[in-house]
Image (cartoon, rainbow, N blue to C red):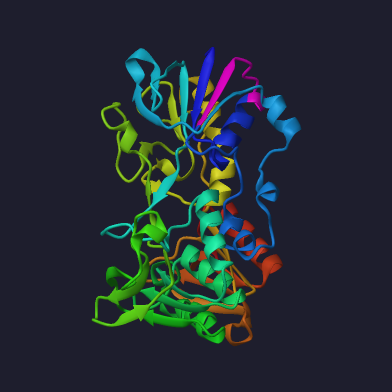
Amino acid sequence: MRTITVIGASLAGLHAALALRSQGYDGRLVIVGEEHHRPYDRPPLSKEFLTGALTADRLSLADAEEIAELDADWLLGTRAEGLDPPSRTVALADGRRLSTDGVVLATGAAPRTLPGEPLAGVHTLRTLDDAAALREELSRGQVRVVVIGAGFIGAEVASSCATLGHSVTVVEAAAQPLLPQLGAEMAAFCADLHTDHGVTLLTGTGVRALHSEPGRSAAADDGRGRVGWVELADGRFLPADVVVVGIGVQPATGWLEGSGLVLDDGVVCDAGGTTPVPGVVAVGDVARRAGHRAEHWTSAMEAPAVAVRNLLAGTTVETYPAVPYFWSDQYGIRLQLAGTRGAGDTVRVVEGSPEDRSFLARYERDGATTAVLAANRPRPFTRARRELSREGGLAAV
């Protein structure tokens, strides 16, 4: 291959590029990114960056020396709009067409939004620009914040807003926050974290509509009305100065329609990131490997090395079997989860206690551990995660 194009200047895209060079690829390397920024770290956006503890320049994932060593052509601020594998070309939004021998798909995912007209004061949080816009609003004085969705991002935003002294309400459609991931017992622990810190948590109801603030001129907000109320599905109305929508993401695959790739909640590929289309691999949040799509920072950092090895080999010579791993910082608590909890699993606390806000718990099924969860127990968690990984996701109790 003389030219390889990485679509997506993300964590996964950067590590794909780094892996290509470290594995001996010395041809032309092109990196296309829709954002104007070089790859940066996303996890701090909802935490340290939002609270002002970190500045944008501290988020960079590669320093100037590493960027120079990549010897890549960076095409930033432009979006890929089409892929034509037979002609080996990538169409860009600015009209250019890139000829390439290999493609690494690392376009990630985009946040889901609520239906209705866009209103000022309503935010999603995925990019650095998203976080900067939200931080600017939060810096104007104490405001009423409504966070829609109590998943990891929603919980972290709520925690950051509470830390900054804002009045925060979290709305979650499920009966408890993080219920699918953690099960009822540990989801109750996460619910308590919100209420412990003065955050109002409303569960079991969705959002029907967002309403603009009566009497406010749309001209003051770039021609848009400004949010003033959140109408819940149960008929209640919540006053809101700022709304953050954290209801999940969808993989950025729309531009790949008609490319010949199989698209089903991501780009369908095998466990090594190899797609059925020769010369194309997928990494990061957009990749659905062996039937599963993982929105994990660790996976986005580690799996690209496997995918590009397979790309250079022209076939799958290695797979990435890592156990799913998440972490989340909420209200001063570091939550860590490894493995996959099943609906019938039981949970057992083996160290500490949820009441003390420090514990290690194991999810178990038929005498084996399927997942481990920790709150402020990093060392015991690391040992348990390593044990889980050695057993391929199921560790003997």
- Of residue 364 and residue 295, the one placed in the foreground of this image is 295
Q: Quadrant of residue 327?
A: bottom right
The quarter holding residue 300 reads top right
Q: Position of residue 259 (x, y in %)?
A: 30, 26
Q: Is residue 393 above or below residue 32?
A: below
Q: On the rendered structure, is 350 left or right of 100?
A: right
Residue 211: x and y in percent read 29, 70
Q: Which residues are magenta?
A: 21-32
Report x, y in % for residue 155. Answer: 50, 70
* Residue 169: image location, x then y, percent: 44, 78
Q: Is residue 34 visible?
A: yes
Identify whether 385 is placed above or below 216: above
* Displayed quadrant of residue 330: bottom right
Looking at the rendering, in which quadrant would you find the C terminus? bottom right
Count of labels in the image: 0
Compared with 393, 25 (above or below) is above
As for residue 22 lying within the magenta part, the answer is yes
Which is more toward the observer, 386 or 330?
330
The residue drawn where x is 59% and y is 43% is 301
**Vertical position of residue 98 compared to residue 65: above or below:** above
Residue 264 is inside the magenta segment: no
Q: Using the rendered image of the protein, determine whether residue 343 is visible from the camera's viewpoint.
A: no
